[in-house]
């Protein structure tokens, strides 16, 4: 039988019940113009979500889903969803035999670093990341040789081999606290050049003297926003709150009402009273808030990550049934232990 063949659930009643469950969640998603979430579309995916959830139990698997993936994954089959820090914690705590990481490859590597005894798989091995792919371990070793006195900090959006070369790993939710606490005055921060710019600004605000040196990676979503959009939107929508990510340019973050990690952006919007919000980040986060806080009103501005959108229910189902060798995350044990040391220090410092 082809792996893309959907097995028919035992009864029509099960499909209808599952469709109704999905509709309660997905009917609030307005940002996603690629789907029309109604009872018919929910019925069309219900057999697949039922199959995946049954396979999870059979395989003793956990599905971790980043907030940027499709809403039918987040609300249909994911056991945990959130930003990279939250999912790193879940990977650390997981006792599952199999972890399916619906996100991008560096996140699955992080899960393998933290859960070495689990089989960690990705639905699509091509789901890369412009930040993680911008720097190799060899390139970082060259930078370290040029700045031997620097503390080496890597953003979690980096490969396992880059993490293995670092003193500590950070996420967008703890980066300022950890950089501020580093004993070195000179910090080599990789791979995000734009986040490095925002770190410099934040350290100045905190009155902390740090020299921040970075490599030249950027996020293909967050480096594309136009500051003119903020100005025009504030004129059209009085009371608008603009929310952005520290992977954005200084032109964007300096004009934002709030700058923070994926999780912190979500909390800010949920807890803040405003007539309108513009979220300058990946559209998946807007879709999550539309589901969880349907009273919030959003002005268009988000962008799609092509790598995150490589994830699909069909690919998750197939990788649960029979993963291909390249979908299985394998790491050299020496490298894994070195990368684990950097991540573990992050947990200790944050």
Image (cartoon, grey):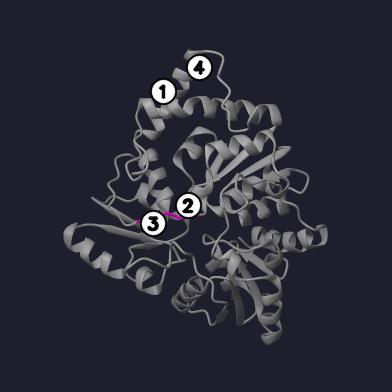
Q: Is residue 78 visible?
A: no
Q: Identify the residue under disc 1.
A: 20
Disc 3 from disc 2: Cα separation: 17 Å
| Crowd class of label 1 (few under 14; some 14 to 19; many from 20; radius 10 Å) | some
Q: Earlier in the sequence, mark 1 or mark 3?
A: 1
Q: Can you give x and y, in whole percent of width and height, for residue 123 in the image?
A: 61, 44
Q: Identify the residue under disc 2.
A: 263
In magenta, the rendered stretch is 302-306
| Crowd class of label 3 (few under 14; some 14 to 19; many from 20; radius 10 Å) | some
Q: Can you give x and y, in whole percent of width and height, for residue 11 in the image?
A: 52, 13
Q: Earlier in the sequence, mark 2 or mark 1?
A: 1
Q: Can you give x and y, in whole percent of width and height, for residue 19 in the image?
A: 43, 24
Q: Earlier in the sequence, mark 3 or mark 2?
A: 2
Query: What residue lies at 62% left-to-right and 71% top-to-bottom?
Result: 135
Left or right side of 5 for 15: left
Question: Helix, strand or loop at disc 4?
Answer: helix
Question: Helix, strand or loop at disc 3?
Answer: loop
Q: Earlier in the sequence, mark 4 or mark 1?
A: 4
Q: Residue 303: give its label.
A: 3
Q: Identify the residue under disc 4.
A: 14
Q: Earlier in the sequence, mark 4 or mark 2?
A: 4
């Amino acid at each position: 039988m082809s792996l893309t063949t959907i097995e028919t659930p035992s009864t029509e009643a099960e499909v209808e019940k599952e469709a109704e469950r999905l509709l309660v969640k997905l009917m609030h998603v307005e940002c996603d113009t690629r789907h029309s979430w109604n009872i018919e579309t929910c019925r069309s995916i219900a057999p697949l979500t039922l199959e995946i959830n049954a396979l999870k139990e059979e395989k003793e698997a956990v599905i971790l889903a980043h907030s940027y993936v499709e809403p039918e994954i987040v609300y249909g089959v994911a056991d945990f969803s959130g930003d990279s820090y939250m999912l790193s914690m879940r990977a650390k705590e997981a006792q599952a035999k199999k972890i399916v990481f619906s996100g991008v490859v560096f996140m699955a590597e992080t899960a393998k670093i933290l859960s070495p005894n689990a089989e960690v798989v990705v639905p699509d091995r091509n789901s890369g990341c412009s930040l993680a792919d911008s720097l190799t371990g060899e390139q970082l070793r060259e930078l370290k040789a040029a700045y031997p006195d620097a503390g080496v900090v890597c953003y979690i959006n980096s490969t396992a081999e880059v993490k293995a070369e670092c003193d500590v790993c950070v996420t967008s939710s703890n980066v300022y606290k950890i950089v501020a606490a580093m004993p070195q005055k000179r910090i080599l921060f990789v791979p995000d050049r734009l986040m490095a710019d925002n770190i410099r600004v934040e350290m100045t605000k905190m009155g902390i003297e740090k020299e921040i040196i970075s490599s030249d990676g950027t996020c293909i979503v967050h480096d594309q926003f136009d500051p003119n959009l903020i100005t025009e939107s504030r004129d059209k929508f009085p009371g608008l709150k603009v929310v952005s990510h520290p992977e954005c340019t200084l032109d964007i973050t300096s004009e934002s009402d709030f700058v923070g990690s994926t999780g912190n952006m979500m909390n800010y919007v949920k807890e803040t009273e405003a007539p309108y919000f513009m979220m300058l980040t990946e559209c998946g986060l807007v879709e999550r808030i539309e589901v969880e806080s349907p009273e919030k009103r959003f002005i268009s501005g988000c962008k799609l990550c092509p790598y995150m959108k490589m994830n699909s229910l069909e690919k998750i189902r197939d990788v649960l049934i029979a993963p291909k060798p390249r979908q299985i995350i394998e790491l050299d044990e020496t490298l894994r232990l070195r990368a684990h040391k950097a991540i573990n220090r992050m947990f200790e410092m944050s």
